[in-house]
Structures are given as structure tokens and as C-alpha cells.
Amino acid sequence: MQGVTHPIVKDVVLVGAGHSHVTVLRMFGMKPIPGVRFTLISRELHTPYSGMLPGLIAGHYGFDDAHIDTGPLARFAGARIYQDEVVDIDLEARRVICRDRPPVPYDLLSLNNGSTPNTANVAGAGEHAIPVKPIDGFLARFEALIARVLARKGRTRLVLVGAGAGGVELLLAVEHRLRRELAQAGFDAGGLSFVLVSDTPEILPSFPASFRARFHAILAARGILVVVGASVSHVEAGRLTIDGYSPIEADEILWTTQAAPARWLAKSGLPLDSEGFLTVDDTLRVVGRDDVFASGDTIAFSTRALPKSGVYAVRAGPVLADNIRRSLTGRSLTRFRPQRDALYLVSTGEKSAVGTRNGLTFEGGWVWRWKDWIDRRFMRRFNELPEMAQPVKPPASAIADSAALKEISAIAMRCGGCGAKVGATVLSRALGAIEPAQRADVVVGLDAPDDAALVDTGGEKLSLQTVDYFRAIVDDPYTLGKIAANHSLGDVYAMGGEPQSALAIATVPYGLEAKVEADLSAMMAGANEVLRAAGCALVGGHTSEGAELALGFAVNGLVGRDAALRKGGLKAGDALILTKPIGTGTLLAADMRGKAKARWVAAAIAHMVQSNGPAAEILRRYRVHAATDVTGFGLLGHLVEMVRASDVDVTLATGRVPVLEGARETVALGIFSSLQPQNLRLRRAIRDVETAAAHPSYPLLFDPQTAGGLLASVPLAEAVRCVAALRAEGYAHAAVIGLVAERSAVLEPVTLDAAGASVEAALVERLNVLPTQSEEEHAAESVH
Ligand SMILES: Cc1cc2nc3c(=O)[nH]c(=O)nc-3n(C[C@H](O)[C@H](O)[C@H](O)COP(=O)(O)OP(=O)(O)OC[C@H]3O[C@@H](n4cnc5c(N)ncnc54)[C@H](O)[C@@H]3O)c2cc1C
């Protein structure tokens, strides 16, 4: 997928998308080393920037302002990105052990995985307090806290434990946000109370007295009670027990005490200090290991103590990148020299901040604006990356014909997955000239093409035969294996069959034997997981070396003699149902260009690995008449195949078609799969196409899908309950998207109804669904 031109010689694995690793990725993106491949393994794909976190909590920033999107960044760096949690390192075999995927081999490893909350030492804190670390989970926990405060109409006693800079800043941000939320909801904020508790004799213990004094004044002015020298010994629901003090009642408890190391490090065999942090030397190399670096909160220097602060993790980034480069190229390493007296700017909830440097302290709105300027400038380095080079640029002098130039440029950016399919028109022209041998036992072949061929092998059931093969659409071979297998099974499910056996065909890029083996193993492990879950035996295959990673399967299935679902089974009066959202083509094309958000791509992948098997089973229960799987020719292309084979008209409610998050945005940017133009030719099947084309989802009707959902027709009377059953099974976006009618005299068989009023009206009329009632609500009623 990265268009690999050099065989991979070294694998650098980065664990955690922390503040140093984002700089490593950026710097290697600017200046890659041929043959060196980076893989980022991170629990979260959008990494919060600690400097902007309090502003996000206070409500001054949106999610994307305060998070670095690792998707485009990894693409820029030519890095693979695996969303997973690391649970161990096998130092001997040089492999990273992950929770949900096969081990990841490395030649060089770097750890920037942050820290965890220190709740372990206080009984009950783990169960009853809300930890601020890991930050990536805190945002959801904070949203839940806001909802509870609103439910109590504001009457809430909130206690925050830990009075370092992070704790004080967070409490002021929380206080500001809660008052604002309550005011917006029309509640009195007078029922809110706040307490700051710390076991240190002072708040902000590592800061100058003048800085502390400012914060004492600010906390007092906001009515926040400060309890210092108070060691919490026990936490239970609604109460904190404190040595030497009366217990404190609390409805909400936030926990921001000293950071603790990740627990899994203890069993890794890596050298740790007395608290369990990784010991590194001044070059950020883990002591005693030539092949492991580490940075950020997870480390302790063997030579000196340094606070756990995002500032240092940021500062270490360029040194870490440089030393990884030096290590790979056999040069001596440089030392990390953290600044002695860092500039600290700590915000106070509203748009104001207090700063300190070299013993000086300053405060005001201007300090917040200064901090905001510094933070935004930092974020721009990662969220506004230089344009990526196009993979192939034909010399203009070589091609005088601009149309040909355009076509060649398009070829240069051709998509993988089903976007790499040959267009429907090209295919039918090429196959039109072929005359296959005629055999009585071929029930469905090229003369009436369907999702799979049907062959009578003389048994009780008919044999379903289908093959799919495509270039990699994701850089992760394990995920590619899952998607390819799932995609190949789709044809069998669409025909109403059960998968029986599969043969694999794989192409792996040239490279060192160990690298080829690792990629192939991961790819086949992913594929086999999916095939096993489907009860489909992997019985053989063929592999070869080639320029790009590619994978496919020839799948055999079985179906009862009269049970095969055909594309031509649509009946007037049916409702059209789509089981998964569309948009994978444009999102993957955008991802190739570094223009898709990591969370959009992750959601698209989640849909691509979701099996169509259970959906097929549910459709059968609701008397399905016809089905197909939506793949390369896009929703409209596959619908037209069904409409023509069934000799009916259909109305498609464009606005009801489920769409993946981000797909409308990438289409609006003009980013399409390379197969889109060929799919667009099918617009001639649409009535009054000029008007229909105005809808923002219209281009997505032609978007090629990889491992797309099932498009099926069921009797209208069954449609709502069928959709509810699909949603309950995990097809959260399943929807009624259209209606089937008798064939009319009008040439074009497809009508697009942008607002979906006709579908809504049919559901209301036939099923007595109130226009405002959701399909689930109605289904629930009709069950009782
Ligand atoms: C409320 C609050 C405010 C703060 N404000 C500031 C501030 O203004 N300035 C400042 O300098 N510091 C601040 N800090 C401290 C700062 O957040 C941390 O020091 C900083 O985030 C540490 O950065 P890091 O790069 O080490 O790790 P992190 O930024 O925590 O990143 C760790 C990464 O590793 C990933 N990860 C973790 N475990 C695993 C695993 N097992 N497998 C895979 N991936 C994993 C995570 O998903 C994440 O991507 C604040 C802290 C808090 C709590």
C-alpha cells in the first residue's frame, strides 16, 4: 500500500503515540531511510496533547484541536499503524506482544507509552476514583461525570486528589466547565462544591512560592477548599478517609496523584528503577540494551531525576529521532540535555493563565493567549503536514496528450481493495467475447452472472464457487488478511450459502526471508481467524513474490438445491435493506493521501471485518427474496445488476443510505477511489439524474466497497422488524433504503428520492409507523 520500492531491511517499532514518537514520525517522514520500516502500535489513534488538555476540559477547544491525528502522520512517515495494546516484550525473540494480534517483530524498539494513575497504594481508589491517566480514557469518563452532575441538577461535591500542576489546572478547568454546563442547562451552580486534597505540605510543591501564592488566591476566589498534608488512606463510594482528618464526603472523586509506570513493564525483563519506570541513559537508550529506546513519562534517567511532564517528552522527541537514525546508521548517539528551568504556563479554567520561568511569575489573559499560540503552533506541525508526493510523475515531455497524462496520473494513485477492480463495462466487454464450454451441471455461470457460480456436483446441495483477490488496502498484513477473507466469503453469504473451503492466493513484496515470513504469517493468521469463525476450512493456496502485498481467496460454499438467493429475485412491493454503511472507497483513497482521520479509517476497517454471515441468516428469517453483496461496482452498480435481472423499477432513498463517518467530507474534498469514474457510467440508469445528483451522498452511491454489506429485498411488511433484528445483531447502521415497484414504461429503472419521503410514507402506510418513531421502537412494539 505504501508503494514499497526498497526491500525492507530493518523494522523499527514504536510503542505508544506519545509526545516524543509523534516527532519521530514527523522527522522520518521528512527524511526517510530507504529500507527502514516504521510500525506504530498505539492503544489510541488520536493522541491528546497534554498542553491543550485543560483547555479541552474547560470547553475552549474541540477534540480535533487538542489531539494529534496519528493516521495522516503515520501515512506521511510511511509507517504502519496498528491500534492495539502492548502487554509484553519478548526481548529474546525481539517481538512486541500485543493483546489482540500476533506478535510484532522488531530490529529496533522505542517505548513512549506514558504512565498510569497511582491508585494502587490506596484501598478503594481504583474502584471509586476517576483516574486522569491514561488521558485517552479520561475524556469519556469526564463526559459521563458531566451527565451525572446535570442529572443531580448541580448538587455535587467534587474532590480532586493530587495538587501538582496537572491536578490544580485540571480542577480549575473542571470547575469552569461544570458551572458553564449548569448555566446552559438552566440550573443553579450554587450546589457545586470543590475540594483539592494533597498529601504534600503545599500545593504545587515543585514551583516557586510566588507561583503558589497566585494559585492559592485563585482557588480561594473560586471557593475551592484546599486540604494539604492530608494523606488519603481509603476510598469508598461517596467518601474519602484521610489520616488525621475527618472523612470527606464526595459525589465525584478525581485522581491525579504521582504517575505510576505501566504494570506490564515489570514482567518484560527491561531494567526498571525502584518505582518501576524504565531506566534509560542520557541518550534515551534503555540501560544495557542496544536495541531499545524509551522516552516520556515511562522513563527514569539513570543519572538524574526529571519530573514527569509533557514538556520533557516533547523536548526529547528530536533527540530520540536523531538517536534512532544514528543507531540505524551505525553512528554514535547524542545526549538529551533537558532545559534546567522550563517555562511553565498553567491555565486557570477561564481564558487566563499563570506562568513562571527563572523564578519570575506572571498572570493574565495575555499569558493564556501566549500559551494558546505556542500550543497551536506545536499542533500545526503534526496536523498540517507537507503535501505528500504523488507515487508516479510521468515527465510532461513524454506525454503530449493531456487526456493520456490525466489517465496515467490516475493510474499512479490507483486504489487497492475493491477500488482496484476492473470496471463493470470493461469486464462485460472483455467477457462478452468469450464462449465458455457448455455443461449441464453448471447451474449459474457466465451466461447469467451472479455473486458466485453454482455447480451441481451431484450431491444433496449445490456447490457455490467464487474468487476474490486484491492489492493491499491497509498496511497491516494481519488486518488485510481479515478483510480479504471476509470479503471473499461475502459472495457465498449473498447467495444464501454456507462457506465450506478456501484456497488462498498471496503476493508478498520481495525482501529478507524473515520479513517476508513475518508478513505472510500475520496475513494468514488474520485470514484464518475469519475463515475459522465462518466454519470454512483453509485447504491450500499459492504464494508468490511481487511488488506489492496482495491477497485473495477462492471460496467454495454449499447451498440447498432451491435455496440459492439470486440477484434477480426482487419483487414489486419489497423493501430494499442495506446492512452496512458505504464509503470505504473514498475513505481508503483519502487515507492513501494522508487526508483521512485515523478514527474514520478505523471505523471503516471495523465494518470491513464484520462478517455478513449473521446478516444473511437474519435476512432469511424475514423472507428475503433477493440479495447481493455491495463491492467494487458500488451501491448503485450492484443495485442496477439486481434491477435488470429482476425486471423491476426501484426508488432509492439517498438520504436513508447509511454512510461511514468522514466519507461525505472526503468526497467533498474531491477524493474518490480510482474505480469511481467507471462506476459513474451507471448514472444512465437514474431517472432525472441532474436533480438527484444534488444530494451530498449522491457520489457515494458509486463508491466501490471492500467487504461491503448485503443489499437485499424483503417483503415491506417484514422490513422494520428485519432492520431491528440486524441492528440488535451488531449491524448498527442497517436501514431500509428503498422500495421495489413494477417495471414501468420509463427507460431508467432507478428513481432517487433524496429525502426518502416515499420510503417513509410506505412504512407509515403499511406498518402504521409514526413518522417520528424509530424503526427499532416500532419493531419493539410489534413484538409485544
Ligand atoms: C490534567 C493534566 C494536565 C497536564 N498538563 C500538562 C501541561 O500543561 N504540560 C505538561 O508538560 N505536562 C502536562 N501534564 C503531564 C503530561 O500529560 C504527561 O507528562 C505527558 O502526557 C506524558 O507524555 P508521554 O509522551 O510520556 O505519554 P502520553 O502522552 O501519555 O502518551 C502515551 C501513549 O502511549 C499509548 N499507550 C499507553 N500504553 C500503551 C500500551 N500498553 N500499548 C500501546 N499503546 C500504549 C497511549 O495510547 C498514548 O498514545 C498534564 C497531565 C495531566 C493529567
Image (cartoon, rainbow, N blue to C red):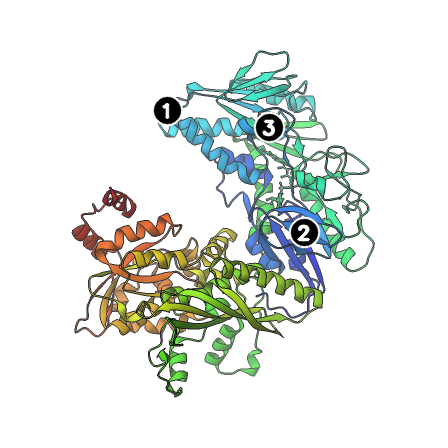
Q: Which residue is mark 1?
A: 187
Q: Position of residue 474 (x, y in %)?
A: 54, 61
Evaluate whether residue 364 shows in this view: no
Tell me if the residue at label 3 has its CB under 8 Å from ligand 1. Answer: yes
Helix, strand or loop at mark 1: loop
Indicate whether 441 appears above or below 596.
below
Indicate whether 630 appears above or below 458.
above
Image quadrant in which the N terminus is located: bottom right
Q: Position of residue 112 (x, y in %)?
A: 67, 45
Q: Residue at x 32, y 72 (%)?
A: 641
Quadrant in the picture for residue 218: top right
Q: Which residue is mark 2?
A: 96
Left or right of 416 in this view: 717: left
Q: Amino acid at mark 3?
A: Gly
As rendered, which of 259 and 105 lies closer to the eye?
Answer: 105
Quadrant in the picture for residue 186: top left
Q: Residue at x 53, y 82 (%)?
A: 399
Q: Earlier in the sequence, mark 2 or mark 1?
A: 2
